[in-house]
Image: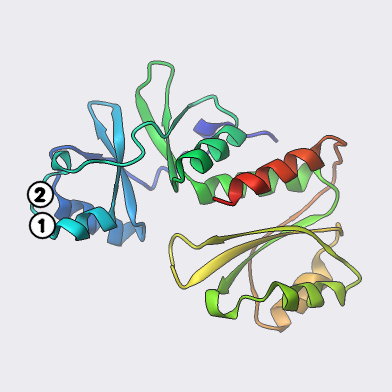
């Protein structure tokens, strides 16, 4: 299924208002385990404030309106395909993309990780093979080791992408495209070596045009 932006909105991430202070922003970031949040004024998207910006000024009483916000034009329409979300986030080097309705009013925000998940689900349905998403410690990352374990099950990694885990800077999320429909044995092998599998997608449908689109998406993920 091809997903559009309004279906990817992360409703757990609330927007800050210009009258809010930096202390509130830091509390929300800590609670959400996110280092940035959207800012909205009367349903208009204003931009993104980050934890780094607040720490630099070292004044938690400062209002959001006093900051020079980032990614002020990092937006998509609610009917945009998730490919467009990836494109905008890549061009803006942003982790969040605001979603606007037909009247240009803010209706929510999408994180890059939300879009990666949608990408994996779409690719899993339309491209031959299977997709596995792993959560790994940054210091333990070795694609060569993981490839060896996959190949022990008579399979190969067709493509891969890796992103820092937005919820834990010490971890990374590794997405693997594998040339097998049945991932059971591969997952069992990886888990035996204490790799944590956080998602798996096994396909049932093939589309001849999807490999090119898959390559394009993996390029967008390399922000």
- Mark 1 Cα within 10 Å, few/some/many (few <14, many 20+)? few
Q: Residue at x 46, y 73 (%)?
A: 170
Q: Residue at x 43, y 17 (%)?
A: 102
Q: Quadrant of residue 31?
A: bottom left
Q: Residue at x 17, y 37 (%)?
A: 18
Total numbered circles: 2
Q: Quadrant of residue 70?
A: top left
Q: Residue 122, which numbered label?
A: none
For label 2, the SS is loop
Q: Residue at x 84, y 54 (%)?
A: 129
Q: Residue 59, which numbered label?
A: 1
Q: CA distance from mark 2 to mark 1?
A: 6 Å
Residue most extreme to the bottom: 193
| Residue closest to the eye, 192 or 89 | 89
Q: Quadrant of residue 174?
A: bottom right
Q: Residue 62, which numbered label?
A: 2
Q: Position of residue 204 (x, y in %)?
A: 84, 46
- Quadrant showing the N terminus: top right
Is there CB contact under 8 Å for labels 2 and 1? yes
- Mark 2 Cα within 10 Å, few/some/many (few <14, many 20+)? some
Q: Position of residue 67 (x, y in %)?
A: 18, 43
Q: Is residue 190 above or below residue 98?
A: below
Q: Position of residue 200 (x, y in %)?
A: 70, 59
Q: Is residue 147 left or right of residue 57?
A: right
Q: Is residue 158 above or below residue 194?
A: above
For label 1, the SS is loop
Q: Is residue 189 above or below residue 130?
A: below
Residue most extreme to the left: 61
| Residue closest to the eye, 185 or 212 | 212
Q: Is residue 147 left or right of residue 12?
A: right
Q: How is the image coloured?
A: rainbow
| Residue closest to the eye, 63 or 30 | 63
């Amino acid at each position: 299924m091809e997903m559009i932006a309004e279906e990817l909105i992360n409703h757990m991430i609330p927007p800050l208002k210009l009258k809010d202070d930096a202390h509130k922003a830091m509390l929300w970031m800590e609670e959400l385990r996110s280092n940035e949040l959207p800012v909205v004024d009367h349903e208009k998207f204003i931009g993104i404030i980050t934890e780094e910006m607040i720490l630099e000024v070292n004044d938690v009483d400062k209002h959001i309106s006093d900051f020079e916000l980032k990614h002020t034009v990092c937006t998509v329409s609610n009917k945009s395909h998730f490919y467009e979300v990836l494109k905008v986030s890549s061009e803006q080097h942003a982790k969040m993309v605001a979603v606007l309705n037909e009247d240009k009013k803010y209706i929510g925000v999408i994180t890059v990780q939300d879009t990666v998940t949608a990408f994996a689900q779409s690719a899993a349905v339309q491209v031959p093979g299977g997709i596995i998403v792993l959560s790994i410690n940054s210091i333990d990352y070795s694609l060569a080791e993981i490839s060896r374990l996959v190949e022990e099950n008579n399979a190969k990694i067709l493509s891969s992408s890796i992103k820092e885990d937005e919820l834990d800077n010490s971890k990374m999320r590794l997405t693997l495209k594998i040339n097998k429909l049945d991932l059971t044995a591969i997952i069992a092998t990886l888990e035996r070596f204490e790799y944590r599998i956080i998602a798996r997608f096994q396909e049932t449908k093939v589309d001849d045009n999807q490999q090119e689109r898959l390559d394009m998406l993996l390029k967008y993920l390399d922000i």
